[in-house]
Image (tube, rainbow, N blue to C red):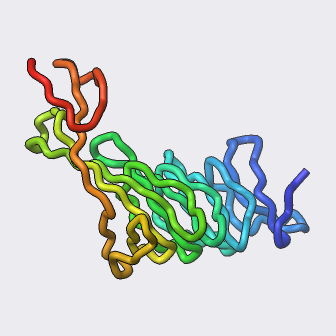
């Protein structure tokens, strides 16, 4: 059985396991080149490209977003995306239905939209680059709207579009053993070795 949305259904070829899309007559409308394919919703579908990347395509099979490590379904015109980072910590952002990053994929944590706003956090290592130390981190907290503008906790806009600013910044310390395993985490602790 196929699940048709607007006359198109995702289907899998049993011989090689690749996914593509068929119309209601069984004709191939988007080639079977994907590792996974989701049903279309509002004219877009999430597909897993060869390898591990995900992107969104339109009903013509055209890629409308850049590739991401993971994507979610669109809700209210926006999808959360997860980008790979060079330091093995993935970063989160949001794209619109045109595939544009309205909130760039630079956040360590990013919530879901609620009443038009989403909370986000960024951690910045204050130690020397490539030191491997995590004992001094800066936590930046954000409230963002669907255009990328920043707000404080009272709802006052504190930045223009695409000028993302934190509403609060605090110093946080994470303590690691000599082998790099996390011992405990906290705020404003003092310690000696």
Quarter of the view holding residue 159: bottom left
| Residue 28: % across, % down | 77, 65
Asked if residue 181 is positioned above or below residue 87 in the image, the reply reads above
Toward the viewer: 94 or 187?
187
Horizontal relation, residue 94 to residue 4: left or right: left
Image quarter of residue 187: top left
> What residue sits 62% from the left and 72% below the top?
77
| Residue placed most toward the observer, 67 or 106 | 106
Q: Tell me: residue 146, above or below residue 168.
A: below
Image quadrant where one finds the C terminus: top left
Which residue occupies 38% across, 68% down?
152
- Res 101 visible: no
Q: Report the side of 146 relative to 160 (left or right).
A: right
Towards the viewer: 32 or 97: 97
Residue ID at (9%, 21%): 192
* In the foreground, 22 or 96: 96
Tell me where residue 81 appears, x and y as whole percent.
Answer: 50, 57
Q: Position of residue 135 (x, y in %)?
A: 18, 33
Percent x, y of residue 92: 44, 55
Q: Is 157 above or below relative to 27?
A: below
Answer left or right for 165 relative to 129. right
């Amino acid at each position: 059985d196929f699940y048709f949305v607007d006359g198109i259904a995702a289907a899998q070829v049993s011989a090689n396991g690749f996914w593509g899309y068929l119309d209601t007559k069984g004709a191939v409308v988007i080639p079977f080149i994907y590792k996974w394919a989701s049903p279309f919703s509002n004219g877009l579908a999430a597909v897993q490209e060869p390898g591990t990347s995900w992107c969104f395509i339109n009903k013509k099979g055209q890629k409308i977003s850049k590739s991401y490590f993971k994507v979610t379904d669109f809700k209210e015109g926006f999808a959360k995306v997860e980008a790979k980072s060079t330091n093995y910590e993935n970063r989160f952002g949001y794209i619109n239905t045109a595939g544009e990053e309205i909130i760039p994929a630079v956040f360590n944590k990013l919530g879901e939209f609620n009443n038009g706003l989403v909370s986000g956090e960024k951690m910045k290592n204050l130690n020397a680059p490539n030191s491997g130390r995590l004992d001094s981190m800066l936590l930046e907290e954000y409230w963002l709207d669907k255009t990328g503008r920043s707000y404080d906790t009272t709802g006052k806009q504190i930045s223009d579009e695409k000028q993302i600013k934190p509403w609060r910044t605090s110093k946080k310390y994470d303590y690691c053993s000599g082998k790099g395993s996390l011992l405990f985490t906290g705020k404003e602790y003092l310690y000696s070795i």
